[in-house]
Amino acid sequence: MSTEHTAVAPVSLTDGAIKELNKLKDQQEISDDFGLRVGVEGGGCSGMSYILGFDQKKDGDNEYEIQGIRIFMNKAHGLYLAGMEIDFKSGLDARGFTFNNPNATSTCGCGSSFSA
């Protein structure tokens, strides 16, 4: 497995996202062997969907750290996610993680898929 650790993550997490991720990690009793996987996969109404969930590091992953949260990202996904901000909204009109991706040329109405 790759042990590469890069200091500057290509994505950022807002304070709201960090708070919610720490809360989820504690509630689900996720061990420190797991980090937050951020990536993309084919599918969704706009062509690509975001991947966001706790996972173990895999071959081909870069590892980053943002305010104590380990981030795992497949090296090939950085092209699509560079500069993206992940936030957590908990308002009356929407609740959940949101993705502000400057590389997206179009997005779907729910904000969970995009094309680049």
Image (cartoon, grey):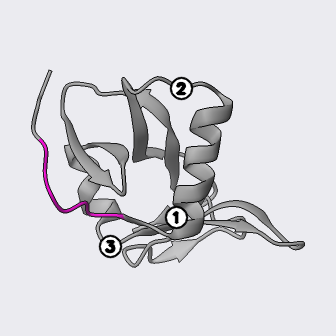
Residue 13 as seen in the image, left or right of residue 4: right
User: How much space separates mark 3 and mark 2, taking CA atoms?
Assistant: 27 Å
Q: Residues within 10 Å of mark 2 (few under 14, many from 20)?
A: some
Q: How far across and down, in percent of the image, does residue 102 sit? A: 40, 79
Q: Which amino acid is tagged 2?
A: Ile
Residue placed at 36% from the left, 23% from the top? 33
Q: Residue furthest right?
A: 92
Residue 32 as seen in the image, left or right of residue 61: right
Marks 3 & 2, CB-CB < 8 Å contact? no
Whether residue 7 is visible to the viewer of this picture, yes or no, is: yes
Between disc 3 and disc 1, the foreground one is 3
Q: Circle 1 sits on which residue?
A: 114
Q: Circle 2 sits on which residue?
A: 30
Return the disc, 3 or 2, that comes first in the chain's sequence.
2
84 or 113, nearer to the observer:
84
Magenta highlight on residue 96: no
Q: Which amino acid is tagged 3?
A: Gly
Q: Secondary structure at mark 2?
A: loop
31 or 86, nearer to the observer:
31
* Mark carried by residue 83: 3
* Mark carried by residue 82: none
Q: Secondary structure at mark 3?
A: loop
Q: Which amino acid is tagged 1?
A: Phe
Q: Quadrant of the N terminus?
A: top left
Return the disc, 3 or 1, that comes first in the chain's sequence.
3
